[in-house]
Every structure is written in structure tokens, then in C-alpha cells.
Amino acid sequence: MGNHGLLEKRVQVVAGVDLGGTAINYTLINKEERFLIENLCEHPALTKQGPEVCLQQIDDGLKIAAKLAGVELSDIVAVGLDTPGPASSAGVLSMRGSTNFAHDAWKGFDIREGMAHKLNKPVTYLNDANAGALWGHFSIFGANSKETSISIVIGTGTGGGVIIEGNVLKGRVGFGGELGHALIPYQRIAGIEGMEPHCNCGRVGDLESLASLTSIAKTLLPYFLTKYPGHELSKDSDINHAAKMVRGLADKGDEMCKEIFRVQAHALGLFFDCMVNTFDPDAFIVGGGVLEASPAFGKWFLDEIKVGMPPQREEQLDIPIYAMPNGDTAGARGAAIEALTMARATGLI
Ligand SMILES: [Zn+2]
């Protein structure tokens, strides 16, 4: 490239593309780490129709996103992609397929390479949970950080990621930061005697089996309803529907529903304790539905995580626990930051 005068003036941006089950979400970030699209920029995802149709959709949507941000397609020097797993750290989708990539042609498909070829630009890859974690990390430390953070996002399942000294831990075969399936000593949590929290992965007592929406429907709500006979949620014949009511009721002060979230917070406390001793991190970051309730409830929940942690060394008592911002755009933003880091490291930007 060199120091050509014209190049100096060129706008250079990096795109983030979050490919989900039904929608592709875009963002653009410039060299100054400013996002050029404030809100959601979505385009329908046609993953079920296979790679060819889907990659065309991504390409079409990127043109729309560039226009929205007021840049040319040629100004985009690199693209960060994130998708749901399972996929290798290099972006090769699992041979076993997945809910999102059900079409046969996706099996073992190198989606990173496929997109690089389609867009004719360098592409980085992260799974969606790790992209979300990188966004959480960036929102606190910026893109040039050397800090270490552990993120947990509580949704239907439990996602998360580990950022070590500014870099995403992807792992040997792409399962780095798969924190939801780490076992925790849940028997230490008060008030759940006799509970057997089963996870969909087959384990008993991992983080997701206690700290996810699925765990509320599957384990926590049925368990606590036996302790609170006559509770209004016992009248709901659809347990999945009732589970979705728990957060709102807890936010309003319902005792049983608050107990359910206390157990979730204490499960996180036990998990974070393990992370304190493994990584001595600069921060914990928590995102997901629980923090989309009232600010007071969010604060109570984060405080309760600390209550659930076993005693810490004095030097580590002050490791902060932050709330993760912007749930909807987290994946695209994290993917963009990964691409920005690559673009800087390789001199593209
Ligand atoms: Zn599990």
C-alpha cells in the first residue's frame, strides 16, 4: 500500500456481520472505533436455503448497510463474521449440522472462506457467543486493550466468552469460552436441597442447568412451585410460558420468583469464583434478559452474584461485575471489533 497521498484521505471502515437464524445484523466501525450505524440494521437471513443463497443475502445486505452508514462498499477493508456454532475456530461449520444450518450443503462448509470469496475481502470468524463477549469487553476496555474479562450472557441457554489480554480465546477446536457447560458445585447453593438440575447437553449441575431461561422451565420453576403451593404461576399449564413470567414477577418483588433469580445469581457466583482462580481477570461482564428488567433489579442481581461467591483473597475482592450493553447488536459489534483488530495487525487499516 505505501504512503500514497490519495490513500491517506480514503475512508476506511470495517464491517461486522452477525448471521442469525432469521436475520443478518450489520454494523460498521471506523478507525477511531466509532460505530457508524446507531441502531439495528437487519436483512433477512436465508440460511435454510443453503450457502449460495445465504452468501448472496449477506452480500446484498452489506450494500444496504454501507449506504446507511454513508460509505462506499470499497471503503470496507475487512469484514468480521459471527454465526451460531458449532463451528471450528477458523469458521468451518460442524459436520453434524445445527438448527440454523440445517441445509445439507452447510455440513463442513467453510463459511469464513466462502464469505471472503463472495465479498472479495478478508473475513474473520467468531462464534456468536464469543463475538458477544468481545463486544462486552470492548464496551469497557476499548479495542486495544490488554485486559482479561469473562462474559456470561443468560438467554435461552448460557453463552459467554473469555477474552485474554484483549484476545478472544477460541480454543483448539472452536469450543473455547463454552462456559455454560462447565460444572459448578451447585450443592453449595442454599435452599435447593434435592434439586437435580439437568442440562440439555446431558450434564447435571453445569452453569446452563441453573442460569438460563431453559433451566427455569426445566428445573427451577417446577422445584420452587412445590415450595410455594398456590403461587399464581402454578395455575399456568404451559411451563415454558410460566417460565417467561418469572423475571417480570421477580422484578415486582414476588418472593418465589426472586428466589429463582437468587439461585441463578449464586450459580454465577460459584462459576466466577472458579474463573477468579483460573484467570485473575480484570472484569466480569453479565448480559441477557435478567439485565433488561429494571435497573434496580439488575443491580440486585449483580450484587447477589457477589453474595454467592465463596470468600475471595483480599487482593481480588474488587474485581468488578459489569452489565453488558446493547444486547441486540452485540454479535455484529463484536465481529466488527475482531475484524478491526485483524485489519490493524495486518496493516490493512
Ligand atoms: Zn450443559
Image (spheres, rainbow, N blue to C red):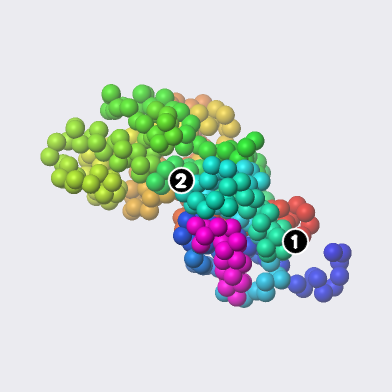
Which badge, 1 or 2, comes first in the chain's sequence?
2
**Amino acid type at mark 1:** Ile
**Helix, strand or loop at mark 1:** loop
Which one is nearer the viewer's eye here, 192 or 205?
205
**Residue furthest toward the front?**
104
User: Where does residue 340 sit, x and y in percent of width and height?
Assistant: 68, 57
Q: Residue at x 25, y 33 (%)?
A: 223
Q: Is residue 241 magenta?
A: no
Crowdedness near tag 1: few (<14), some (14–19) or many (≥20) residues, C-alpha within 10 Å = some
**Helix, strand or loop at mark 2:** strand
Q: Residue at x 62, y 37 (%)?
A: 173
Residue bounds of the magenta highlight: 46-67
**In the figure, 277 relative to 113: above or below?**
above
Quadrant placement of the C terminus: bottom right
**Amino acid type at mark 2:** Val
Which residue is tagged 2?
A: 153
User: Where does residue 191 sit, x and y in percent of width and height?
Assistant: 27, 28
Left or right of residue 155, residue 138 in this image: right
Question: Count the marks: how many?
Answer: 2
**Label drawn at residue 103:** none
Which residue is tagged 1?
A: 349
Quadrant placement of the N terminus: bottom right
**Mark 2 within 8 Å of ligand 1, using the beta carbon:** no
Main secondary structure along the magenta-highlighted residues? helix
Which one is nearer the viewer's eye here, 189 or 318?
189
Q: Residue at x 56, y 61 (%)?
A: 54
Crowdedness near tag 2: few (<14), some (14–19) or many (≥20) residues, C-alpha within 10 Å = many
Gap between marks 1 and 2 measured at Cα = 31 Å
Quadrant position of residue 214? top left
Is residue 345 among what the camera can see?
yes
Quadrant position of residue 116? bottom right
